[in-house]
């Protein structure tokens, strides 16, 4: 069955950073790839969610899988909450801080931190949210525990983390599967193992090495 993967990038990014993930998903799984790019610091999360819905609606494909890195995962969640009638498909979050973000809260302690964070991330990451996955699409979550990202420069982590997001921050009630791999927040986009696991979940609804949420 023909399927398209819509990739939603994170804060301050453009989508080009996922070039290796894209190459592997296209080559190994045969999926088409569509990058949803948005002004992550200028728009509200509602505006981003509506624009993502418009991008999905414009696709001529019977199955649409959604992959979100970091803040991109929250954009996907908000889009499906606001626009639940979507083509069938599965969802994978990569290093998404689903509940709150210690790194974001550390950033806003600096004078220019709130401006750097922007409106959407400020709405979603600075306060603890009682979120749960309730959409009918199956959700798989991949977290990293290799602490090698810039978030370590501003936030003190006392638990497993990918350098920007802690493993516990990625857990979301209602997800079908949760997998922790030895990758960093940015490095997960370059990882062949992550690409394999993303493809496994999109195709089969489970990771190669399942881990209960």
Image: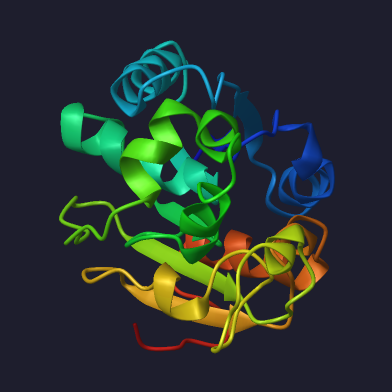
Q: Say how many tags the image has.
A: 0
Residue 166: percent from left, percent from top: 52, 75
- For the residue pair 64 and 78, the one nearer the viewer reads as 78
Quadrant, the C terminus: bottom left
Q: Is residue 143 visible?
A: yes
Identify whether 170 is placed above or below 45. below
Instruction: State the residue at coordinates (34%, 17%).
Output: 47
* Lateral position of residue 123 relative to residue 4, left or right: left
Depth check: 163 or 22 in front? 163
* Relative depth, front residue between 58 and 100: 100
- Residue at point 55%, 60% (across, down): 103
The reply to whether residue 84 is visible in this rendering is no
Q: Residue at x 50, y 17 (%)?
A: 42
- Percent position of residue 86, x then y: 26, 30
Q: Name which quarter of the figure residue 53 lies in.
A: top left
Residue 127 in the image: above or below residue 196: above
Q: Is residue 105 left or right of residue 126?
A: right
Rendered location of residue 14, percent (x, y): 70, 28
Residue found at x 49% / y 29%:
118
**By what rule are the colours in the image chosen?**
rainbow
Left or right, residue 211 beside residue 209: left
Name the spot of residue 208 as percent of width and height, x first: 58, 81
Residue 158 or 5: which is nearer the viewer?
A: 158
- State whether residue 87 is above or below residue 145: above
- The answer to which image quadrant residue 11 occupies is top right
């Amino acid at each position: 069955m023909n399927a398209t993967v819509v990739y939603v990038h994170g804060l301050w990014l453009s989508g080009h950073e996922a070039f290796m993930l894209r190459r592997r998903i296209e080559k190994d799984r045969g999926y088409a790839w569509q990058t949803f790019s948005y002004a992550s610091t200028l728009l509200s999360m509602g505006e981003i969610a509506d624009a993502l819905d418009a991008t999905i609606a414009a696709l001529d494909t019977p199955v649409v899988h959604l992959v979100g890195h970091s803040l991109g995962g929250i954009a996907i969640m908000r889009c499906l909450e606001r626009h639940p009638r979507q083509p069938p498909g599965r969802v994978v979050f990569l290093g998404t801080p689903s509940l709150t973000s210690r790194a974001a809260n550390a950033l806003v302690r600096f004078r220019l931190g709130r401006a750097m964070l922007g409106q959407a991330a400020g709405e979603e990451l600075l306060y603890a949210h009682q979120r749960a996955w309730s959409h009918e699409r199956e959700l798989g979550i991949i977290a990293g525990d290799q602490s090698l990202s810039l978030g370590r420069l501003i936030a003190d982590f006392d638990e497993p983390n990918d350098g920007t997001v802690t493993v516990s921050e990625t857990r979301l009630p209602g997800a079908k599967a949760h997998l922790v791999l030895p990758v960093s927040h940015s490095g997960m986009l370059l990882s062949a193992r992550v690409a394999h696991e993303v493809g496994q979940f999109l195709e089969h609804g489970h990771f190669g090495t399942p881990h209960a949420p």
